[in-house]
Image: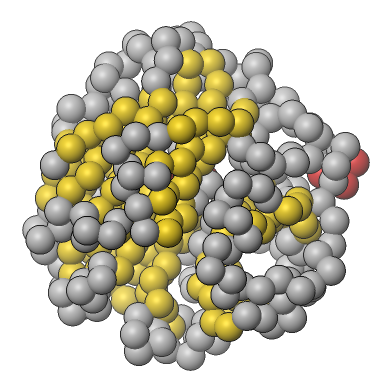
Amino acid sequence: MEHVIIYQEKNRYAGWPANYGIWSWGNEIVTGFSLGYMDQNSEGLHPRDKKRPFQSFQTRSMDGGITWKNELAPLVIPGNIGSISSEEHMSFSYGPISERVNPPLPHPGGINFTHPDFAMLCARSGLERNAESWFYTSTDRCNSWEGPFILPMFGELGIAARTDYAISNPNKVTLLLTSTKPNGKEGRVFCAETIDSGESFKFISWLNEMPDGFEIMPSSVVLDSGEIITAVRSRNSAGNKNWIDLYKTQDNGRKWNYFSSPVNNTGRGGNPPSLIQLRDGRLCLVYGYRDFPYGIRLIISEDNGHSWSTEKVLRDDGGDSDIGYPRAVQRSDGKVVVVYYFNDSSKPERYIAATIFDPK
């Protein structure tokens, strides 16, 4: 096992790769993160300076996660300021995205979702009522992005999109998105799709229309059978229990069924899942653990999620609970690369790291 520093700088706050997504082509891996500044007087879980805009960064490895190149993400962000998930970082709002410079526009269609170098990135302005979402596409391995393009509100009070999609054919993609609940609070996961190459999107179904607390941040795998398994970050209504649930659909998202809860505790505040299918068919579920000892963990299933291995600790040397938000891919030699944010104590910077391990 090997731990690699992707980005680290004194007094800077780098975080939340799961808010972006991850894409890979063999040993070429691309992901993103938000970059701002530390503020040790900030209240709550994240000691970041909410008075200074965060920026969206993109990082790329050409050698399977050993070395990385960081740059400002080549994205046009509505308002030309902040990041693609600025609601987590700022003490003020930029206002409706339609009123900003470079607002998202309707997509004219014509996306080829099966292009060998295709990638799609979903973004959002908020988490609760009035949250709006948009997306970008790339056909050159994230070297450039087209967009922003509007994602509809689907009749909901707010849509908080993060990147999770399943490609069916050149014209059709299924999106797993997060909506507000009827009271305007986050959140619940639903399935939507486009069958006309991105020109329009249609609501298909809820995974769980009325969760007790919230279910957010889906991460999905399409099995060889065509079934889709989606892992979601779950929390109870009291806010004192956090875990990971699985849902499954056998009809391409028309109906979903609760499957299991393979992780019953992700620690203080919870942490999103990263679910991938290994080339040998096994499922690998990675997540941050925000109770002591703070770190990154995983479990593996050899039977399509019906049963899971005992928990494996990738690292447990975090300084406090402000860690995690992983995204994972498998590289050409079979090893898995997990990207996440981390800290060595509660005082210094938050940084982006990767762990490379053999899942055998």
Location of residue 355 (image quadrant): top left
* Rendered residue at 10%/61% (across/down): 360
* Rendered residue at 25%/49% (across/down): 265
* Rendered residue at 85%/42% (across/down): 102
1, 185: nearer the viewer:
1
Location of residue 136 (image quadrant): bottom right
Please determine whether, in this image, residue 342 is positioned above or below residue 209.
Answer: above
Please determine whether, in this image, residue 145 is positioned above or below residue 283.
Answer: above
- Provide residue 17's location: percent of width, then percent of height: 45, 41
- Provide residue 170's location: percent of width, then percent of height: 62, 80
19, 269: nearer the viewer:
19
Question: Left or right: where does residue 234 sit relative to residue 93?
Answer: left
* Rendered residue at 78%/58% (across/down): 150
- Provide residue 176's location: percent of width, then percent of height: 54, 67
Please determine whether, in this image, residue 197 is positioned above or below residue 297.
Answer: below
Question: Left or right: where does residue 163 sit relative to residue 64?
Answer: right
169, 309: nearer the viewer:
169
User: Residue 52: in sight, yes or no?
Assistant: yes
Please determine whether, in this image, residue 195 is positioned above or below residue 26.
Answer: below
Q: In which quarter of the image is the N terminus?
A: top left
The structure's colour scheme is secondary structure
How many numbered discs, if any? 0
- Provide residue 228's location: percent of width, then percent of height: 41, 78
User: Residue 176: in sight, yes or no?
Assistant: no
Location of residue 315 (image quadrant): top left
